[in-house]
Image: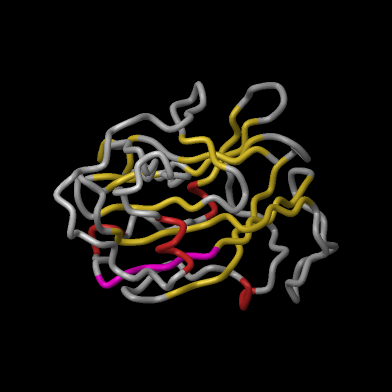
Amino acid sequence: MRTLVLFAVPVIALGAVVGCGNNSANPQSPDVNAVHSSGLAVPSTSTTTSPARTSPATSPRGNIKKKVGDVAALCTDDTCTDFAVTFTLDKIEVDPKCTAKYSADGKAENGHFVVLSFTVKTTTKFTSDHTHLSLKPHEFSVVGPDGVTIQNYATSGCTAISEMLPVNFSPASQYIGKVVLDTKHAHGVVVYRPSALDGGWEWEY
């Protein structure tokens, strides 16, 4: 199991998996938001100063707390100067209109469909070592208002296959797609904690 190494660019790394945030306090550390929006140009390595190690905001569950629109990433090294992949949760929709052709009556088996829209960008550094970043529905869970964590399992379907994220990602590629959760809670916390990592991310909805 890989351990999270947390930096001022709060990304989780492979040597570092990082939950990226605002790193304006350290102008020499790579700006992950800028990297993400510029098509993942390789961050500058001209400086010999390593990013200061700090801890981003984490939940009592040990996950990096994120907001919709925040960038998260897997780094390729412990200094987090290069990224293998960045991903952003762009939108959370509760009980949207189903678009799947065979979505039965459009009702969630457990009560509510929670649809997560992601943008994923991989760099040329993305290899088979990073395939645990799959964003598969079963790697998500929901913490309800009662504090109970419920693992997400297969749903009856809601989103058209053409709108879903692929199972596997390729290097130097960009993906936009959705992950569908089926939960009894219309409000709670979405947790993404891949089994191959000692940590993860979470978003309140």
* Viewer-closest of 27 and 195: 27
Q: Residue at x 47, y 45 (%)?
A: 22
Task: Work out which quarter of the rendered image holds the N terminus and state it.
Answer: top left
Is 189 contained in the magenta span?
no
Please identify the quarter of the rendering in which residue 185 is found: top right
Side of 10 relative to 99 (left or right) = left
Viewer-closest of 43 and 64: 43
Whether the magenta-drawn stretch holds residue 123 is answered as: yes
On the image, the x and y values in percent for residue 145 come to 72, 26
Question: Which SS does the magenta portion mostly show?
Answer: strand
Tell me if residue 158 comes above or below residue 143 in the rendering. below
Q: Is the image coloured rainbow, by chain, by secondary structure, or in one colour? A: secondary structure
Q: Residue at x 24, y 54 (%)?
A: 81
Left or right: 126, with 145 as reference point? left
Q: Position of residue 3 (x, y in %)?
A: 26, 36
> Image quadrant of residue 150?
top right
Please tell me whether residue 32 is drawn above or below residue 176 in the rendered image.
above
The picture places residue 83, in percent across and down from the top left corner, at: 30, 59
Magenta span: 119-124
Number of marks drawn: 0
Question: Picture coordinates of residue 179 (x, y %)?
Answer: 59, 59
147 to the left or right of 95: left
Residue at 69% of width from left, 34% of height from top?
188
Image quadrant in which the C terminus is located: top right
Of residues 34 and 125, the one drawn nearer to the viewer in this rendering: 34
